[in-house]
Amino acid sequence: MGNAADDSSGKGARSLSEFELIDRFFRDCGARRADVALGVGDDAALLNCPPDMQLVAAIDTLVLGNHFLAHFPAESVGHRALAVNLSDMAAMGAKPAWALLALTLTKADPEWLAGFARGFSALARKHDVALVGGDTTSGPLCISVQLLGHAPRAAALLRSGGRPGDIVFVSGTPGDSTAGLAFELGKFAVNAPAGITEEVAAYLRNRFHFPTPRVELGQRLRGHARACIDVSDGLLGDAGKLAHASGCGVRLAWEQLPASSQLVAVAGEARAREMALTGGEDYELCFAVAPENVQRMTRELPPDAWGYTAIGVLDEAPGAVVARGGTVMDFSHSGFDHFAGGHEP
Ligand code: ADP
Ligand code: MG
C-alpha cells in the first residue's frame, strides 16, 4: 500500500505502477508450492501448514547505509535479504517454506528491482521457498523479509539446550565474509606478489555478497545437536549467546578454529582466526553436541562432507573465552575494530 504522500501524484497512477511492479517482479518469484492455497494478489495469503508441525517464524530487515550500500549489486541485496532469514530457520532446525517481502523504495528502478528479484528468487527456489505476499511502499530504501517454515513439534533446535561438557562445533569458515566486505570497502586490496590474487579477492567478496545459509545441515542436526545458533554477529559473541542461553560458558580452542586458505592468504593465520572469531555476517551454524552423541553425529553427518569443525566445549564457568594452549586470550581489543561499523553511516 503506497504512502499517503504519494496520493498527490494521483491515486490511480500510483496504484497502477505499484501493481505493475508487484506483477512484474514478485508475482512469480521463488518456488511454486502446492501448500500455497492463495499467494500474491489478494489481501493476505492462505497457507496449508502440515499437521503435527510447529510454525517457525523469523524476520530480518536490511537498511541502506546500515546493512548494505547503494553500489552493492542488487542481486546480492536480494540474496542476503532472504539468506539472513534462511540462516535463522537453519539455526532452529526448521524447514523454510513461505516468505513475505516488505519493500520500501525511494523509486521504482526496474534495473535494480530486476537484479534484486533475481537474487531473491534464485535462492528461494534453491530452498523451495515461495514468495506469498508482501508490501510495497515509498520511502528510504529498506527491505524486510519474513520467513515462515516448520519443524516437527517440540523438535526445533534452541539456543538453550546446551550443557557443560558439550562439544561445540561451527560450520564453514567464518571470517571470510568480513574479509570480503573489507575488499568491498577498499580496506583490503589485491596484491598478487603477497599472495592476494584476484581469485582470492573474488572468493572472499562472494562469501560476503552471497552467503550460504546452512539450511540442510540445520535440519539434519535435529536429534544430534542439543543447542544451535547462527553466526551473524561474530563466532565468539554468538557462541557466547548460545552458552549464556544454556546457563553455561564456552571455551573455544584457538588452534582448532577453521580458516579458509583464502582468508589465511589475505590476513595470515593469526589475523584469520581473529577475524573468524570477531567478524560478522557469516551465516554459519554454531552448535553444541553431548559428548556421547558426537560419534553417531560424525558417522551420520561426516564432517568433511558437511563442512563443520569442533572448536571447543561448554563449561560451568560463565562467559566466552578463547584458549591458546593453557592460556586464555584477551579479545577485548579485537582486530575487528578496524572494520567495526565499516559500512555503518
Ligand atoms: P493491500 O493494500 O490489500 O495490502 P497491496 O497493494 O499492498 O494490497 O498488495 C497487493 C498484493 O500484492 C498482496 O497480495 C500483497 O501480499 C502483494 N504484495 C505487495 N507487495 C509485494 C512485494 N513486494 N512482494 C510480494 N508481494 C507483494
Ligand atoms: Mg499491503
Image (tube, rainbow, N blue to C red):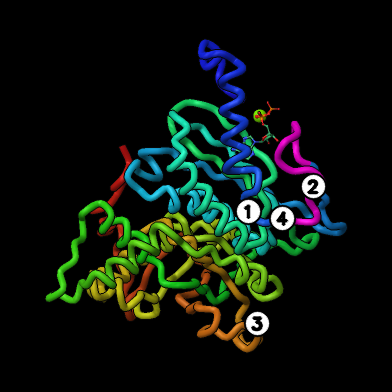
The mark lying in front, picked from 1 and 3, is: 1
Picture quadrant where residue 86 is located: bottom right
In the picture, the disc for residue 293 is 3
Mark 4, residue position: 32
Amino acid type of the residue tagged 2 in the rendering: Leu
Mark 2, residue position: 47
Amino acid type of the residue tagged 3 in the rendering: Asn
The mark lying in front, picked from 4 and 3, is: 4
The mark lying in front, picked from 4 and 2, is: 4
Q: Residue at x 63, y 57 (%)?
A: 89
Going by the image, does 220 lie left or right of 153?
left
Q: Position of residue 330 (x, y in %)?
A: 29, 63
Q: Position of residue 195 (x, y in %)?
A: 19, 76
Going from N to C along the chain, the mark reached first, 1 or 3, is 1
Picture quadrant where residue 261 is located: bottom left
Mark 1, residue position: 30
Q: What residue span does the magenta drawing correspond to?
A: 32-45
Quadrant where the N terminus lies?
Answer: top right
Assess disc 1: are there few (<14), some (14-19) or many (≥20) residues with their C-alpha within 10 Å of its C-alpha: many
Q: Is residue 7 above or below residue 26?
A: above
* Ligand 1 has an atom within 8 Å of the beta carbon of the residue at disc 3: no
